[in-house]
Image: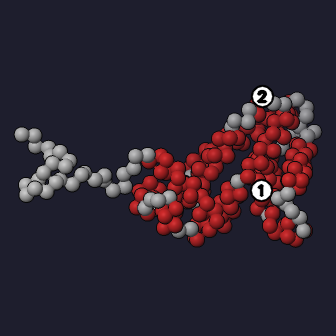
Amino acid sequence: MNELVHAGARRPGGRSAAPARKAPGRTNDPERTQANILAVAAVEFGEKGLAGARIDDIAEATHTSKRMIYYYFGGKEGLYLAVLEESYRRVRDVESELNLQNLSPEDALRRLVEFTFDHHLHHENYIRLVMSENINRGQYMARSQRIQDLNVPAIAAIRDLYLRGVEAGVFRTGLDPVDIHASISALSFFNVANRHTFGTIFKLDMQSPAYIAQRRANVSEMVVRFVRK
């Protein structure tokens, strides 16, 4: 006689055997579960910062459990760092598809500036996360080798287009690719990070299509003129 008891078979005494249960914490699609947790957590951390965010709220919004979140990410700080890494990965992945090497140096620079401006404009939560980590003095980002590695290609792309521009005689010499990156980031970042305070002080609608289009053109022109010979 087979020693295995089939689900639903009668046990001694006439009772049916209970169906086998899944082990706690199991999921049929762990990658999708983790992606969902990261997406919800990004908003939670962006809105409330690390200190104000609650794992309970993230668990409820994702229809999962604190136990599952701790299993995947090791805790609140681990989840926060994973959110930072994923946010940087997304922007660098798209940036790598700009094909800057196939454009003239000046066109490549303009394309990079406009991409950065547009990305920040349409990803306000990314800006909030970066601001939050600056409040934390960058201590969590400093733990991530992944974020360091993600930014290497970004600087390499700027270095490449800049050196091509210098060799072509259209860009001036003596500039640092990291400094060019900083200028692009700062000009693109401000338009989102300070839109409420700056707009209130100077009575500007910084979210109007006309203002955004003009500001986008101005930022691109400022960076190009800074680099141009």
Q: Which residue is mark 2?
A: 102
Q: Residue at image x 68%, y 61%? A: 128
Other-residue count near label 1 (Cα within 10 Å), few / some / many at <14 / 14–19 / ≥20 = many
Kindly report the distance in space between the C-alpha atoms of the residues bearing marks 1 and 2: 27 Å
Q: Residue at image x 59%, y 58%? A: 42
Q: Residue at image x 93%, y 39%? A: 229
Tell which of 59 and 175 is nearer to you. 59
The x, y position of residue 220, in whole percent, is 87, 46
Q: Quadrant of the N terminus?
A: top left
**Circle count:** 2
Q: Is residue 152 visible?
A: no
Left or right, 208 with respect to 125, comes to: right
Tell which of 176 and 182 is nearer to you. 182
The x, y position of residue 15, in whole percent, is 13, 57
Q: Is residue 121 visible?
A: yes
Residue type at tag 2: Asn
Q: Which mark is residue 152?
A: none
The x, y position of residue 25, in whole percent, is 37, 55
Other-residue count near label 2 (Cα within 10 Å), few / some / many at <14 / 14–19 / ≥20 = few
Q: Quadrant of residue 99?
A: top right
Residue type at tag 1: Phe
Q: Which residue is mark 1?
A: 189
